[in-house]
Image (spheres, helix red, strand yellow):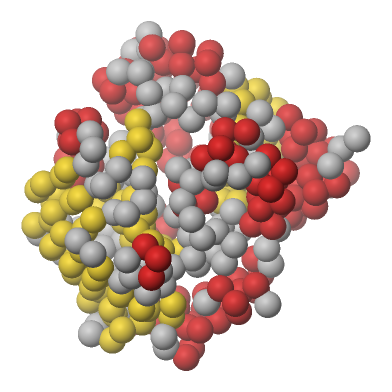
Amino acid sequence: MQDPRFAKLAENLLSHSVRLREKEHILIEVRGEGHALARELVKQAYAKDAYPFVRILDPMLQRELMMGTSAERAARVAKWEEPMYKDLHAYIVINGPANDSEMSDVPVERRRAHQQVMQELNDYLINNSRWTLLNFPTPAMAQSANMSMEAFETFYFDVCSIDYKKMHEAFLPLEALMNKTDRVRLVGPGTDLHFSIKDIPNVICSGLRNIPDGEIYTAPVRDSVNGTITFNTATSYMGTRFENVRLTFADGKIVEATANNTQKLNDILDTDEGARYIGEFAIGVHPYILHPMNDILFDEKIAGSFHFTPGRAYEAADNGNRSQIHWDMVNIQRPEYGGGEIWFDDVLIRKDGRFVLPELEGLNPENLKA
């Protein structure tokens, strides 16, 4: 029997996240586990008189394909997929890998060749379709969260089914404040960083692009970042887990980068010129996500967190930085993680993970849950 919680989640995805309409084409892509949710999405898409299509990708097969790939093969893939992508109105990706590290031994140069060719097509899809990305609850995710499978599923559906319309309304005062802000300063253990966000748009994320959601993002003026930042949350990229990442900036560029795997960290940051500049600054607020689980879709939304992103800027908040890389790195500023502060134009807006300005208090956890 199908879990009724999938029906509610599917309805939220189709009606709120991608706003699927009659006669539209939607691609549902399952990467690993997630067939139960995909079936519910297909059923509800048909009920809306839309046209669902499904693609199933096996992570182990994808690894094998990537191990021998080349720019020439990637170009052929792009040629085959371009007509399909350009005929889509909506796109839902369900990530359900049994092993988060399946791609860890794919050589960086192989992944780089594939990404470089596919980037233009991926950018087209991001900018010209209504898309959303979510992770399916798997034993691997439950283990990363240090929870039983039953407890994790309860957590997962609570997180994914929050009132995103209410969250959007609570974000509006912060959006208005960021639109007026020039100088940002981030302070915390091992962190004293300052940069400008003047004239860079900001974007509220309240369930349209990612599930779970709960952030507002912008980008720093490309050459304005100076100082040092230390991330207290582990981060994975290209199948490798990094801890204790510390970045030092001069005029926007990462001039020193260390971690538990400093060599591989710098190999990734040397992918291209833009990889050593920042493409996103975002503030996370989701009240049910409190601790990291090495899953960026959850970790970047943690209440009392921010993330800072080496690499490509989004078109909606564009500072001109271009890169094959887009690597969200998370710092949690609640007291149990060492605390910290966010300042806008010399005014303290958040301390130890809690917004202190009256107009922003609606974003504190107890108010988003209420």
Residue 14 vs 82, above or below: the answer is: below
Furthest-right residue in this view:
1
Location of the N terminus (image quadrant): top right
Name the quadrant containing residue 174: bottom left
Question: Seen in the image, is 84 located left or right of residue 325?
Answer: right
Pick out the residue farthest to the top.
Answer: 68
Based on the displayed image, in which of its 4 quarters is residue 350 positioned?
Answer: bottom left
The residue sitting at 25% across, 68% down in the picture is 188
Residue 245 is at least partly visible in this image: yes
- Front residue of this view, candidates 201 and 357: 357
Q: Where is residue 271 drawn, in percent x and y?
A: 22, 32
Left or right of 172? Residue 7 is: right
Q: Position of residue 130 (x, y in %)?
A: 60, 49
* Vertical arrangement, residue 245 with respect to residue 344, above or below: above
Give whichever of 260, 310 is nearer the camera. Answer: 260
Tell me: 297 left or right of 34. left
Tell which of 14 and 21 is nearer to you: 14
Please tell me which residue is depicted at 73% across the width and 54% down the height of the picture: 12
| Residue at image point 61% right, 26% down | 32
Q: Quadrant of the C terminus?
A: bottom right
- Residue at x 36% of width, y 67% of height: 333
